[in-house]
Image: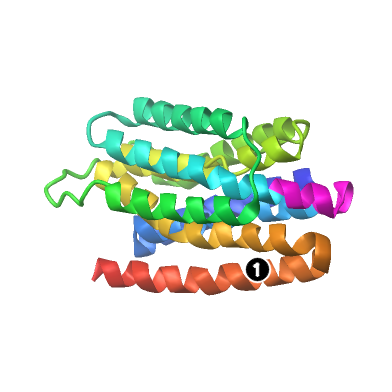
Amino acid sequence: MNSLLLKVIVTPALIGTASLVGRRWGHSISGWIIALPLTTGPITFFLALTHGASFAAATAVGTVAGGLSQAAFALTYARLSTRWKWPLTLAAACLSFVISTAILNQFTFTILPIYAAVLLSFLAALQLLPKDSKAEPVVEESLPSRWDIPMRMIIATIFVVLLTGIASNLGAHLTGLIAPFPIFTATMAAFAHHQHGSTAAVNVLRGLLMGLFSFASFFFTLAVLIESAGITVAFTAAILVALSLQGVSLWLLQRSAN
C-alpha cells in the first residue's frame, strides 16, 4: 500500500471515528483519539523504508520538536475561541503553529532535551486552557447531519494529502516539524466550535493535549531505537509505549471529568 492510498484510507476513517466517538462520549474523547499518530506514524514508516533509518530518526526528532508547535496551536485556539468565531480563531491558531515551526527550524535538537521540553509544554498548555463555562449557550448544527461527518472527512483528507505532498521534499528536519500540523485537531475543533461553542472546542483540545504525551513518546522511542535496533523493533516498541501511555491518559481524562 503506497503512502497516498494510506492517507486517503486512514484520514477519513480516523476523522469519522473521532466524530462518532465525540457524539457518543464527548468532545474530550474525540480529541484524545486524534492525538494518536495514525497518520504521522505510517508516514515515518514509509520514510524509513524509502530513505533509511537515519532519515526516519531525524524526522522523528523533528516530529517530537513539532510538539511545541502543537501546544502553541492548541493554546492559541482555546484562548481565542472564547472571544472569536471559528474562522478567525482557526487562522490565528494555524499562524501560531507556522511561527513556532519557523523558529524551531532554525535549530537542531538532541532527542532527550527536546522531548522533556515538549512534555513540559503540554503540561503548561493544559494548565492555561480556559475553564469550562457551564453557562455557555449551545450552538445548533447548521449542516444537515448526513453531510456533517462526510464534510469533516473530506476536508481533513484534502489537508493531509496536500500538506504531506509538500513536506516530503523539504528534508528530514523540516518534514518532522511540519508532520505534526494539527489537521485533525483543526477540523474537529473548528466543527465543535461552530456547532457547539467554545467549551466544546476547548474540550477537544484538552483531550488532544492529554493524548499528545503518547504521541511524543511514540516518536521519542523511534528516534532512540530505529538506527540501532532496526525498523521492526523500533516501531513495535514505539507502538507499545504509545498505547500504554494512551491508556493512562484516558484514565486521567475520565477521572478529571468526574
Q: Which SS type dominates the magenta stretch? A: helix
Q: Is residue 145 above or below residue 34?
A: above
Residue nearer the viewer, 15 or 69: 69
Quadrant that contains the C terminus: bottom left
Left or right: residue 113 versus residue 252 is: right
Q: Residue at x 60, y 71 (%)?
A: 241
Residue 4: image location, x then y, percent: 76, 43
SS state under label 1:
helix
Q: Is residue 154 visible?
A: yes
* Residue identifier under label 1: 239
Q: Which residues are magenta?
A: 47-59
Question: Magenta span has 49?
Answer: yes
Q: Say which of 27 and 82 sits in front.
A: 82
Looking at the rendering, in which quadrant would you find the N terminus? bottom right
Please give left or right for residue 38 compared with residue 46 in the image: left
Can residue 150 be seen?
A: no
Residue lying farthest to the left in this orientation: 135
Query: Residue 105 colored magenta?
Result: no
Q: Position of residue 206 (x, y in %)?
A: 36, 54
Quarter residue 194 falls in: top left
Q: Amino acid at mark 1?
A: Ile
Q: Position of residue 254 (x, y in %)?
A: 33, 70
Front-most of 18 and 246? Answer: 246
Count neighbours of disc 1 (C-alpha within 10 A) and say few if under 14, some if 14 to 19, many if 20 or more.
many
Q: Residue at x 36, y 70 (%)?
A: 252
Q: Give the answer, above or below, for where 124 lies relative to 242.
A: above
Classify 242 as above or below 197: below
Q: Position of residue 92 (x, y in %)?
A: 40, 27
Counting every numbered tag in the picture gives 1
Q: Residue at x 47, y 60 (%)?
A: 211
The part of the image, by quadrant, that contains residue 248 is bottom left
Image vertical order of residue 130 relative to residue 37, above or below: above
